[in-house]
Amino acid sequence: MDTSKSSTDGADSGTDSTSAGGAGSGSAAGPAEPDETAGAARAERTGWRRWAMDTRPLRRPAYRRLWSSTIVTAVGSQLTAVAVPKQIYDITGSSAWVGYASLAGLVPLVVFALWGGAVADSMDRRKLLLITNSGIAVTSLLFWIQAVTGLESVLVLMILLALQQAFFGLNSPARNASIARLVPEHELPAANALGSTVMQTGLVAGPLLAGALIPVIGLGELYLIDSLALCVTVWAVMRLPALPPLTGSAARRAGWREVAAGFRYIALHKVLLLSFLADIIAMVLGMPRALFPQLAAETYAPYGEGLALGLLFAAIPIGAVIGGLMSGTFSRARRHGLMVIVAVMAWGAAITGFGLSGSLWVAVAFLAAAGVADMVSMVFRGAILLSAATDEMRGRMQGVFTVVVAGGPRLADVLHGTAGSVLGARAAVAGGGLLVVVAMAILAVAAPALRRYE
């Protein structure tokens, strides 16, 4: 987006001054902000800007480049996410094989996300992003080659999926940990809201675009589009400033001893542990997506099973996008821990309302409200992870975060699927939502460190 050399220099100087402040420091905030004066700050908070998306981080060229690349890849990655299970189902005619492929991708994601966090803490994160984004792009190209050659091998697809998820596991901790070096601490919630909004928009637009393109251009070309989109990401990362470790940790090996040190760090820093527990409570007890097909076929069948299923899956991401677009209403809050508690409890209440709803449109409204609450929770949990951890530990914290985000919903699928077959779908959903509210209330009372965290 920047065409002048001065813009590039501004990105570099901004990152250097942020880095000099050290981890967890809000004193060094990069380039001077346009809203530094009290009068400008008051003007910024008036009218519609008080509730609209907080775009302050986009004033920083380095962050703007990283964020802009996400706009393209958020949609492109969803094309591959649709194409892989579709191709496997076309080859086998079995949903079981689709499930096995998901498991084949989960294992390397977990392993390499944990290890990737240690790698991100021991080398230049920009260099790691270049390597891993290039690896993901090559993997998407290999997906395209196997599709256009008519290989029709499920084994090859599962190997490529495992390779892709391994690269993603290495990439995600470095990408997320880099944000704290590109924006000052007080803008972290806004930066997280911007990134999460783009990703949630991709979850809605990507599958819709894939469904529209498959009959027109074919399945294989979706992989090629994703690969080309990733080239944009590689170009954007090349224009980022260097992001070496702030301490002498570059000489340290990124082995499993360092991964274990990350878990010890979490155990010793209560607010980090509590933020992970809050996410586990919300996702494991309150994510009802495994019951969407049953609810669409039974409770909401009069509305049309296909329509009901599509709306149920789209409602939470749509709500999250709405929450992101209105992030100005909450991104400046200082009580980050309290915001997480309130958001998780609001998520549980909305899921309970969804489970009790006999009307499809009321159910969708409750799920959208849950999506808004999920966005708020994501924003402040991400801010806590970036601000409460030192820079030399941020990669490992993001690695654990990636595992929790990926693994929690899958555990929820097993829990809700089992409960739904025993109690019925609506009872299982409503009960899970109530458990979220109760468990989060107990955690807030028993562990005051989270609700007091600013």
Image (spheres, grey):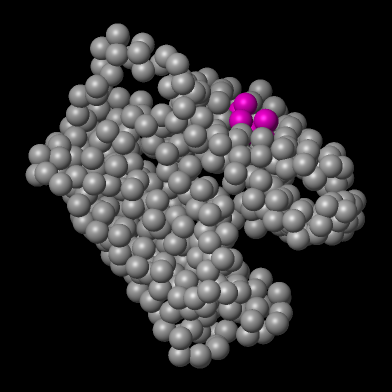
Q: Is residue 211 above or below residue 277?
A: below
Residue extending furthest top? 39
From where the camera sits, is residue 415 visible? no
From where the camera sits, is residue 320 visible? yes
Residue at (61, 74) in percent of width and height: 86
266 left or right of 432? left
| Occupied quadrant, residue 254 | bottom left
Q: Is residue 79 above or below residue 364?
A: below
Residue extending furthest front? 216
Residue at (43, 79) in percent of width and height: 144
- Asked if residue 344 lies in the magenta stretch, the reply is yes
Residue at (65, 78) in percent of width and height: 89
Measuring from the top left, give residue 385's x and y in whole percent: 44, 38
Measuring from the top left, give residue 168's x and y in whole percent: 42, 62
First to last magenta residue range:
341-347
- Asked if residue 449 lies in the magenta stretch, the reply is no
